[in-house]
Amino acid sequence: MHDVSYIKRVRTANLVLTTPNEIKRWNFNFDKNTVEPVQPLSKQEKKILSLLAEGKSSKEIANELFVSPHTIDTHRRHLLEKTNCIDTTGMITYCKLVGLL
């Protein structure tokens, strides 16, 4: 168990269930007192996340993936929303802790 509240926008706890065939993730939202499923990351989001974890900038990632830096920034914003993290560094830390990266 890891306390990641310092990198989250909304107070949540992560629930991760692992079976031989799949991994399921939920967030418990303390403010709403509800359990919410974690939205899965797309292949492109996972690729961008791994490149961000390598320390690459949006411009470098855009050049590598043959897209515009604006597209990378949009993916980064969506990743921050999906992971409920306050910044990219926290998002990378969180993703490593919960097995998304």
Image (cartoon, rainbow, N blue to C red):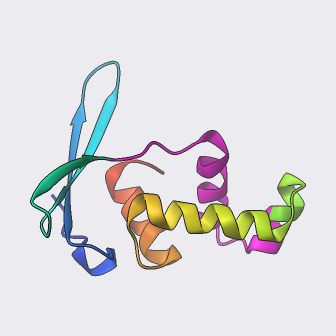
Q: Position of residue 27 (x, y in %)?
A: 23, 53
**Residue drawn 61% across the image and 66% down it:** 76
The residue at the point 86 percent across, 65 percent down is 68
Give the residue furthest to the front.
Answer: 32
Location of residue 33 by image quarter: bottom left
The image quadrant that residue 6 belongs to is: bottom left
Total labels drawn: 0
Q: Magenta segment, principal secondary structure?
A: helix
Relative horizontal placement of residue 66, taking residue 91 as reference (left or right)? right
Outermost residue toward the top in this view: 21
The span shown in magenta is 38-61
Along the viewing direction, whichever of 72 and 35 lies nearer the viewer? 35
Q: Is 79 a magenta residue?
A: no
Residue 61 in the image: x percent, y percent?
78, 63
Q: Position of residue 60 (x, y in %)?
A: 82, 69
Q: Is residue 21 above or below residue 2?
A: above
Q: Taking 55 as reference, is 36 above or below it?
A: above
Q: How far across and how far down the image is residue 92, in percent?
A: 47, 66
Residue 44 lies in the magenta-colored region: yes
Residue drawn at x 49%, y 67% as measured from the top left: 80
The N terminus - image quarter: bottom left
